[in-house]
Amino acid sequence: MKKNGLTVAILAAMFLGLIVGFSIHQTGSQELIDSYSKNIKLLATIFIRLVQMIIAPLVFSTLVVGIAKLGDIHAVSRVGSKALIWFFSASLISLVIGLVMVNFFEPGVGMNLSITDASGVEDVTGKTQSFSLQNFVEHIVPKSVIEAMATNEILQLVVFSIFFGMALAGLGSKGNSLIKALDIVSHVVLKMVGYVMKTAPLGVFGAISAVIATRGLDILLTYAKYFGAFIAGIAVLWVILLLVGYLILGKRLGSLLQRLFGAMVIAFSTTSSEAVFPKLTEELERFGCKNRIVSFILPLGYSFNLDGSMMYMTFASIFIAQVYGIELDLGTQLTMLLVLMLSSKGVAGVPRASLVVVAATCGMFGIPVEGIALILPIDHFCDMFRSATNVLGNGLATVAVSKWEGELEVERLPQEEEKVLV
């Protein structure tokens, strides 16, 4: 009942945010709108920061414990290889869907969009200037684990945690006390998740209300063709993900979606799949995935398996080319797809990561980088669906690997959860 109550509260906050934001947009002066949007957004900022506060200790403790419990390097490589096969297959499918949809609907052909966001362009292009092979490698390998934790660089933290976990596993019985200690730490952090999630409705209200107050609902009509084509692509991606999920899980797929629903709503409302990492960990374990699998696969998924974002990258890049009338032959588009497949893996945790990759890719292929100004006004709404899709993709990936390892248990019932808490 408590879980259902939180979901209802989040949905209510989302609709209330729409109503209040639209009312402010319609009746308030520009000064009031700017002031309201700036201040109400603090609710979302507080919620996101509370979640970010617990991500680093959760990723480190759960991933190290997960690797240590796997026991040896052979087990780690076996599970990791299965995960990477899923990640890269899902990424390739997502990129191809974006490529096919943008060529089929051609949303950028004949479009004349006048609404731009100059400050947003500068923000993204500023990050793009440092986007290179050297920075890609430097972004993966941390020079300091403390710095990686402080800045919530999940990919760097994953690299350190893998080495630490493998070394801990190599100690044998000598490392058991530390494994138990880190296991306790992970459960303490998961307990904190319950407290943090109680603030989710406030964060959702602040995020939705701020963007609607600033831009109103008319922005959806202005970009109807672009947004509609994007939603069609997301729908196709969901169909494929759910079909594969059904082939793996059968009738249990429905139960998994019920578990993931609350996390997807939060990700959708706050445009942050990172915000639900702790909750997603908890729900997957309740579904029947063993802790050692979840704590190993999920952090990797957040770095390598962002299906919604991948689909958006090819879609947005070719859309900008269409707007500027730049013809890209099939060979060029396929090359762009491969570039995106590799480059996107190096910006996990970067703010507006999808736009940064799109801008960098446009620069490589002679497409005006300034074209991202055309998609910035609606990017927030697209990001809602990207974030929710990322959560679904990572949930399915974790469950799939658990099933392939023969370690997917029966779903934990509410009564059993209460016993565990006691």
Image: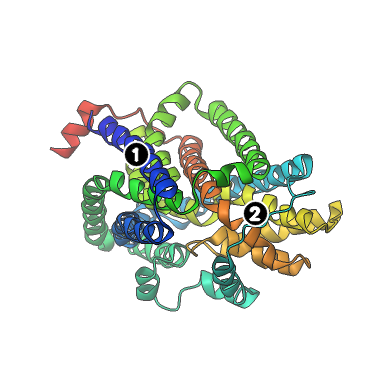
Residue 19 sits in quarter: top left
Residue 168 placed where, x, y %?
Answer: 34, 63
**Alpha carbon separation for disc pair 2 and 1:** 31 Å
Q: Nearer the viewer, mark 2 or mark 1?
A: 1
Question: Eyeballing the image, is 283 above or below 141?
Answer: above
Tell me the residue at 32%/50% (across/down). Answer: 203
- Left of 248 or right of it: where is 322? right
- Left of 305 or right of it: where is 330? right
Residue 46 or 177: which is nearer the viewer? 46
Instruction: Residue type at mark 1: give it.
Output: Leu
Count every numbered label the image shows and give the total.
Answer: 2
Residue 338: in sight, yes or no? yes
Residue 301 placed where, x, y %?
Answer: 49, 51
Q: Which colour scheme is used?
A: rainbow
Tell me the residue at 36%/33% (across/down). Answer: 287
Instruction: Residue type at mark 2: give it.
Output: Met
Residue 274 or 374: which is nearer the viewer? 374
Mark 2 vs 1, N-terminal side:
1
Residue 309 placed where, x, y %?
Answer: 57, 51
Question: Which residue is tagged 1?
Answer: 16
Quadrant location, the C terminus: top left
Residue 298: in sight, yes or no? no
Residue that sits furthest to the left in the current view: 422
Residue 182 or 385: which is nearer the viewer? 385
Say which mark, if any, is on residue 313.
Answer: 2
Residue 378 or 315: which is nearer the viewer? 378
Q: How crowded is mark 2: few (under 14 residues within 10 Å), some or many (20 or more)?
A: many
Question: Eyeballing the image, is 153 above or below 100?
Answer: below
Q: Do the residues labelled 2 and 1 touch (CB within 8 Å)?
A: no
Q: Residues within 10 Å of mark 1 (few under 14, many from 20)?
A: some
